[in-house]
């Protein structure tokens, strides 16, 4: 077993913290957070130290078509599997080092949707997260936990109000990103996959709203990760274990969001209790198919 981030990179924590400028508390005024180039350099070092030869992008023609459509004025969405906090940094690293100027162009446009825990839980985690441009949301899972901890109905209502205010501001920020030609990246499961916990890999029904908001999308699967959750301390992100790995990020053919949604909806019968969840379950099946194809053959066919 490898070392934790805390053990291997603890010597850079102070520099990270000193370079951090992101808000420690999220409200409706700061949901859009621009990348911090200083902390980004540190994240690039972590990835380059732990990305083995053979790591690459697959389906470059799909990344290219997606970028061309975004450049033509289409609103673009990237839906990506989520195994670790190294997923986004590794995607950026490969786009910029394995795909020439096109990859750099696409990377410069990506705005990730991030839960506010990354800002609020720990100053070092916040410094890592702010290496990339984000729109911060109040996730449903976090609201459910907050409501469980609430000691009164008033506290519960206040937290619900805060979640609504933050997420409304986030929707406005996303709309502005679309109009500016930026690309939104979302993890449809909303959390990192934990082995033995299949519920952490189920897509959130809220992703249906993204399909309605955007024109085109690609599904990006991840085979291999250099960072693994320490299941003895799953909530301590700095306990995550570093193990150098070959990492393959593969893009699906471009999906026309509205027609994809409409066509699948037409296949559902009247007994379907939750069509939105059914669409997302179907989407997650496509992730599994692509992931297994890379796992078995090493590339998309």
Image: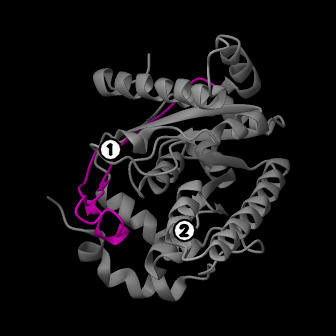
Q: Can residue 131 be seen in this view?
A: no
The picture places residue 147, in percent across and down from the top left corner, at 56, 66
Real-space Cα separation, disc 1 to disc 2, in angstroms: 22 Å
Q: Which of marks 1 and 2 is nearer the N terminus?
A: 2
Mark 2 is surrounded, within 10 Å at the Cα level, by few (under 14), some (14 to 19) or many (20 or more) other residues, namely: some
Mark 1 is surrounded, within 10 Å at the Cα level, by few (under 14), some (14 to 19) or many (20 or more) other residues, namely: few
Residue sitting at x 29%, y 22%? 296
Q: Can residue 98 be seen in this view?
A: yes
Residue sitting at x 64%, y 40%? 207
Most extreme residue toward the front is 153
Residue 268 versus residue 33 in the image, above or below: above
Q: Does the magenta stretch include residue 240?
A: yes
Q: Is mark 2 on a helix, strand or loop?
A: helix
Q: Which colour scheme is used?
A: one colour
The span shown in magenta is 225-254
Residue 17 versus residue 142 in the image, above or below: below
Residue matched to label 1? 197
On the rendered image, what quadrant is the C terminus found in? top left
The picture places residue 96, in percent across and down from the top left corner, at 53, 50
From the viewer's perspective, is 131 left or right of 29? left
The picture places residue 198, in percent across and down from the top left corner, at 36, 39
Of helix, strand and loop, which mostly describes the magenta segment? loop
Q: Is residue 39 magenta?
A: no
On the rendered image, what quadrant is the N terminus found in? bottom left
User: In front here: 176 or 161?
Assistant: 161
| Residue 162 falls in image quadrant | bottom right
Q: Which mark is residue 146?
A: 2
From the viewer's perspective, is 125 left or right of 235? right
Residue sitting at x 61%, y 38%? 205
The picture places residue 116, in percent across and down from the top left corner, at 58, 67
């Amino acid at each position: 077993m490898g070392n934790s981030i805390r053990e291997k990179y603890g010597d850079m924590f102070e520099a990270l913290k000193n370079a951090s400028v992101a808000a420690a508390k999220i409200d409706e005024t700061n949901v859009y957070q621009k990348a911090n180039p200083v902390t980004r350099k540190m994240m690039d070092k972590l990835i380059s130290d732990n990305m083995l030869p053979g790591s690459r992008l697959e389906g470059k023609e799909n990344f290219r078509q997606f970028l061309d459509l975004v450049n033509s004025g289409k609103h673009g969405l990237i839906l990506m599997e989520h195994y670790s906090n190294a997923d986004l940094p590794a995607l950026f690293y490969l786009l910029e080092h394995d795909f020439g100027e096109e990859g750099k162009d696409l990377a410069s446009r990506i705005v990730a949707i991030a839960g506010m825990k990354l800002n609020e839980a720990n100053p070092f985690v916040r410094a890592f997260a702010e290496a990339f441009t984000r729109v911060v949301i109040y996730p449903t899972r976090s609201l459910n936990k907050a409501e469980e901890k609430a000691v009164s109905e008033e506290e519960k209502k206040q937290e619900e109000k805060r979640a609504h205010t933050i997420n409304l501001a986030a929707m406005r920020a996303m709309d502005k990103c679309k109009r500016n030609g930026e690309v939104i990246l979302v993890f449809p499961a909303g959390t990192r996959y934990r082995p033995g916990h299949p519920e952490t890999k189920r897509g959130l029904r809220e992703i249906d709203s993204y399909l309605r908001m955007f024109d085109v999308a690609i599904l990006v699967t991840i085979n291999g990760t250099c960072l693994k959750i320490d299941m003895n301390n799953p909530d301590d992100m700095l306990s995550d274990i570093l193990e150098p790995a070959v990492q393959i990020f593969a893009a699906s053919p471009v999906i026309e969001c509205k027609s994809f949604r409409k066509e699948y909806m037409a296949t559902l019968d009247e007994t379907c209790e939750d069509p939105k969840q059914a669409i997302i379950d179907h989407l997650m099946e496509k992730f599994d198919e692509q992931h297994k194809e890379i796992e078995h053959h090493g590339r998309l066919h």
